[in-house]
Amino acid sequence: MRVIRTTIGLAASALLLAGGGARAADDAQALARAQEIVGGRCFFCHGARGEAASELFPRLAAQNASYIAKQLANFKSGERKSDTMKGMAADLAPEDMRALGLFFSRQPSPPHAVRDAALGQEGKAVYTRGGSVAEVPACAGCHGPRAHGSTTLPRLAGQVADYLETQLKRFGARARTNDNAVMQDIAAKMTAREIKAVAEYLSTLD
């Protein structure tokens, strides 16, 4: 009986190792493909490692892989509006989108330097406790205490402050509709000061 159990255990371990090796090979292939795509188009705006080339563009480094893939699919379908990104995503296959998500998710995302410490503290209060209006809940409730998000929600830590501010305003104006509709209601009730403060705070997190 012990021999049978040992044999089964070894076989199971071998299968796990084989599966891990296959996944590693798949990941390596996906990363190589992603680097080709990034070098051919993405780096102009997002940088070679997703660090963002300017304040106009979002940082993709360390962003959750599945979230990136979803946004690319939404840009391609037109569900998320952007003439530039629609063109960039037009010829991407689902496996390309997954590869890009994997690539960017593995890049470092150092926090941005504090630009306005007082404003950042205001943003921390909104993020952790909620806004001045009762219907504006603490952002940490969904995005997590460190703003790392989840498989379905974006990482906000280390994001470009100006980009975050723009997106919150777009949610509030219901100009962005491809993600959680709750964000539209929340952002619409935030003051301009709260939006700017939260964006400042989040940009300084790692």
Image (tube, rainbow, N blue to C red):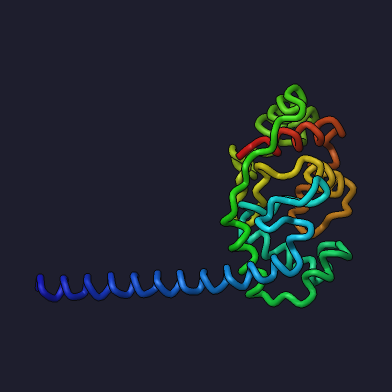
Give residue 57's position: percent from left, percent from top.
79, 51
Horizontally, is 38 left or right of 7 in the view? Answer: right
The residue lying at 63 percent from left, 69 percent from top is: 34
- Could you tell me which quadrant the C terminus lies in? top right
The residue lying at 39 percent from left, 73 percent from top is: 19
Residue 96 sits above or below residue 177 on the image: below
Residue 49 sits above or below residue 3 on the image: above
Q: How many marks?
A: 0
Give residue 181's position: percent from left, percent from top.
78, 53
- Could you tell me which quadrant the N terminus lies in? bottom left
Residue 157 sits above or below residue 17 on the image: above
Dividing the picture into quadrants, the one containing residue 142 is top right
Q: Quick one: 152 or 42, which is closer to the camera? A: 42
Dividing the picture into quadrants, the one containing residue 199 is top right
Horizontally, is 164 left or right of 202 in the view? Answer: right
The residue lying at 43 percent from left, 75 percent from top is: 22
Give residue 179's position: percent from left, percent from top.
75, 56
The residue lying at 69 percent from left, 50 percent from top is: 51
Q: Quick one: 189 or 94, which is closer to the camera? A: 94
Give residue 167's position: percent from left, percent from top.
81, 48
Q: Residue furthest top?
A: 118
